[in-house]
Each structure stands twice: as C-alpha cells, then as structure tokens.
C-alpha cells in the first residue's frame, strides 16, 4: 500500500523529510528496493528545488538562502543511504555509483 504524499505536505521540504525518514526505516526493515524508491524521491526534490549547478563557493546563496555546501551535504547523505540500500540488495555496481 502506497502512501499518498501529495496531499499530506505543505511544501517540498516536508515531503523530502518524510521520504528520507521513511526510506531509512525501510532499510532497517530489509525492504531495500522500496527504500531506494523513496530516497530517490528525496534527491529529485532537492535537485529540483535547491541544487544550483554553479561552481562551489561559500558566497553562492540559493533562493532559500542555504549556502551551496549545505545542499551538497544533504545530497551526499541521501546518496549514501541509496548506496547502502543497493549494497544490501547485492547491487554492488549501483552502490559504488551512489557513493561517488
């Protein structure tokens, strides 16, 4: 049974936070493929709403006023969990790609 997130959240940050925690929970429950789906939703939301493709610099500010390096920290964390889920699923090449 899927959770209908489109009607439960006011903005992308709430949706991203829910999907991140739910994806982590699914890893702990051994549902790795399902967790990857939810964690990829998080990266999609962050890339769409926060990521700026300019060169890294502490002076760059994005519309939500977060420094560039904070957004990369968020994405690195989510990608590490995606890599963990791939690794636990036995998908080692995909895991390595997630950790890059």
Image (cartoon, helix red, strand yellow):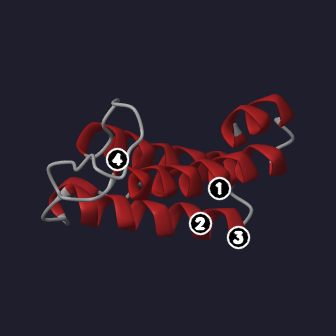
Which one is in front in this view, the residue at disc 4 or the one at disc 2?
4
In the image, 94 versus 1, the foreground residue is 94
Q: Name the residue under label 4.
A: 46
N-terminal of the pair, mark 1 or mark 2, is 2
Residue identifier under label 3: 28
Task: Tell me: 36 left or right of 98.
Answer: left
Residue at 69% over, 36% down: 100
Is residue 31 depicted above or below 41 in this figure?
A: below
Q: Where is residue 67 in the image (x, y as percent from the top left)?
A: 31, 56
* Crowd around label 1: few <14 · some 14–19 · many ≥20 (10 Å): many
Question: Secondary structure beneath disc 3?
Answer: helix
Quick check: 12 left or right of 88? Answer: left
> Toward which corner of the image does residue 57 lie, by quadrant?
top left
The CA span between labels 4 and 2 is 17 Å
The disc label shown at residue 81, or none: 1
Q: Is residue 96 visible?
A: yes
At which x and y percent is residue 96? 78, 36
């Amino acid at each position: 049974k899927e959770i209908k997130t489109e009607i439960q959240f006011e903005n992308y940050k709430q949706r991203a936070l829910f999907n991140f925690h739910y994806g982590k929970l699914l890893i702990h429950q051994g549902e790795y493929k399902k967790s990857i789906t939810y964690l990829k939703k998080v990266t999609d939301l962050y890339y769409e709403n926060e990521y700026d493709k300019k060169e890294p610099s502490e002076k760059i500010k994005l519309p939500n006023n977060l420094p560039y390096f904070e957004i990369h920290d968020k994405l690195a964390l989510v990608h590490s969990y995606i890599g963990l889920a791939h690794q636990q699923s036995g998908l080692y090449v995909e895991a390595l790609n997630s950790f890059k």
